[in-house]
Amino acid sequence: MAHLFRALAERKADDAALIDDRGETTWGAYNARVNRLIGALRNAGLEAGDTISIFAGNSREYFEVMGACAHGGWIYVPVNWHFTADELAYVVDNSDSIAIVADQQFIDVALRGTKGLELKAKIAIGGATGDFQDYETFMHEAEPTEPENESFGGPMFYTSGTTGRPKGVRSSTFQSGAPVEAMEFVGTALGEMLKLPPDGVSLLCGPVYHSAQWAWSFLPMLRGSRVVMRQRFDPAETLRIIDEYQVTNSHMVPTQFHRFLRLDAAERESFDGSSLAAIWHGAAPCPPEVKKQMIEWWGPHIYEYYGSTEGSIVTTVDSEEWLTRPGTVGKPMPTVEVMILGEDGSPCATGEEGQIYVKSLMGADFEYYKEPDKTAEAHLEPGVFTFGDIGYLDADGYLYMSDRKIDMIISGGVNIYPAEIEAVLVGHPAVHDAAVFGIPNEEFGEEIKAAVEVTPGLESSEKLAEDLIAHCREHLAGFKAPRSIDFVDELPRHPTGKLFKRILRDPYWPSDRKI
């Protein structure tokens, strides 16, 4: 049996391990299917150290692929399912993937995005299409016997960057080829630090291609946690799922909190929620009033963290601590040291704002795949890195955020970098220059706005704004398209070419907002 699930498959073989919109898979069946998939991928020519892209929605099959990779020594790349064919092709090629698993709802994009790429296996969940093999047929060509020569494999997440293309984040924690027990250690340690009960029930109500959603679903599974998942978030259905399956833990974003609070009184009052042990949120700032209302409703089970795909979890704060220190993102985890440094690199005094740097006390680090310059820019020295955020530490060691990555937009918990959108806009013949930035949105935190200089000789109009938004949707995932466009006579640029986005952005934000 696959090492990570051997004891679980023996101890609770007939209990449900995975539940999605279409059904459930028991621990015994999950283990057997993971074993089959390991054999099938090896039969297709994949060797330890190779990379597989996954272009699929939240599903039991997704967790089977991740389980197989964790034992076969393969790196897997969870690809954003909103990506266009061009964006998918870039990630598959850049990551050096030699296989891809896609599902039927995205198969048209997968077919276009992998056309002409040299891959050893193209596998489709839900049936063969074009040159993609059927997932079930592919898997059942192998036996469910215990695989030999198991070795550690893990994820490489892609995060957007200011260069306009996603960057692969290679964590030293998830290097392929190590003993499989390394993943077991990570799952156990994280579960204990984040108060996730062993043999609990994890709710996956966000995209598993996001590193946080992965960490709060796949890693608890290693400790025996059942995973209940949905691809689309519906607040009323989520409340019913929590009670029906006795969910103990989940990762959510502030946008979801907003939607819970907007439910009518009857739907809210029907919610029991007594099974909840830990609901974590991060990825975007949560308005204090929203968080207070959630704590009042769900009790002191709301936890917050600060971190990133690159540096994992840096600080945490529970409900009681946060209520006494509103706005804090918590104290550093015992595995990291947080430093606040001024522009000259010297340590800042208590309460003084500076750039946040993180040092892993466990020796963990990261690199941007094939991007040595970007990796160097993020590091003060080996093992000491920054996400580009500004903040300060109070006298008790609690971290507060006072600014975020330059120009980054966080909408509904998703990081969006304007440079990629600006590059698409200036590719339109009617655009002379463009700037993209975030403005307030009550539900999502921020929404995307563009300021555009029209090509000399042309005129701005509502029709042109609509055409430009449609142009972005044609070339980018839909969530990256501007919601609105302002036309300006001239963008505020320095003679060197530097754009002063603050001049464009500040009028939309409260005067006390530091950004």
Image: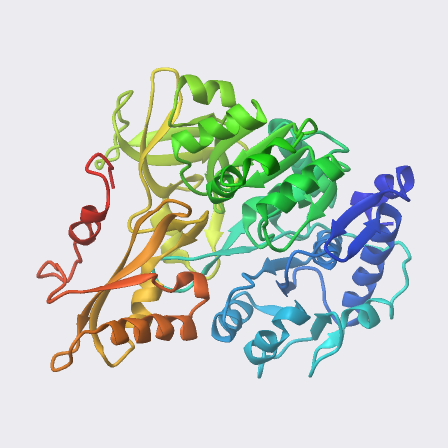
Q: Decide if residue 172 is in sight here.
A: no
Task: Judge whether 188 appears above or below 156 on screen.
Answer: above
Residue at the left extreme of this rendering: 495
From the top left corner, tell me how far across and down residue 134 is, in percent: 77, 74
In this view, the residue in front, 348 or 89, is 89
From the top left corner, tell me how far across and down residue 464 is, in percent: 26, 75
Q: Decide if residue 384 is in sight here.
A: yes
Task: Judge whether 43 appears above or below 234 on screen.
Answer: below
Q: Is residue 161 left or right of residue 145?
A: left
The C terminus lies in quadrant:
top left
Based on the displayed image, in which of its 4 quarters is residue 163 positioned?
Answer: bottom left
In this view, the residue in front, 324 or 158, is 324
In this view, the residue in front, 349 or 20, is 20
Task: Judge whether 172 appears above or below 459 on screen.
Answer: above
Based on the displayed image, in which of its 4 quarters is residue 103 positioned?
Answer: bottom right
Q: Image point 87% across, 67% down: which residue?
A: 142
Q: Is residue 409 left or right of residue 54?
A: left
Q: How is the image coloured?
A: rainbow
Based on the displayed image, in which of its 4 quarters is residue 240 positioned?
Answer: top right
Q: Is residue 32 left or right of residue 477?
A: right
In this view, the residue in front, 269 or 443, is 269
From the top left corner, tell me how far across and down residue 309 is, in percent: 49, 47
Q: Image point 40% across, 22% down: which residue?
A: 398
Badge count? 0
Q: Image point 35% across, 53% down: which residue?
A: 447
From the top left corner, tell me how far across and down residue 429 is, in percent: 25, 81
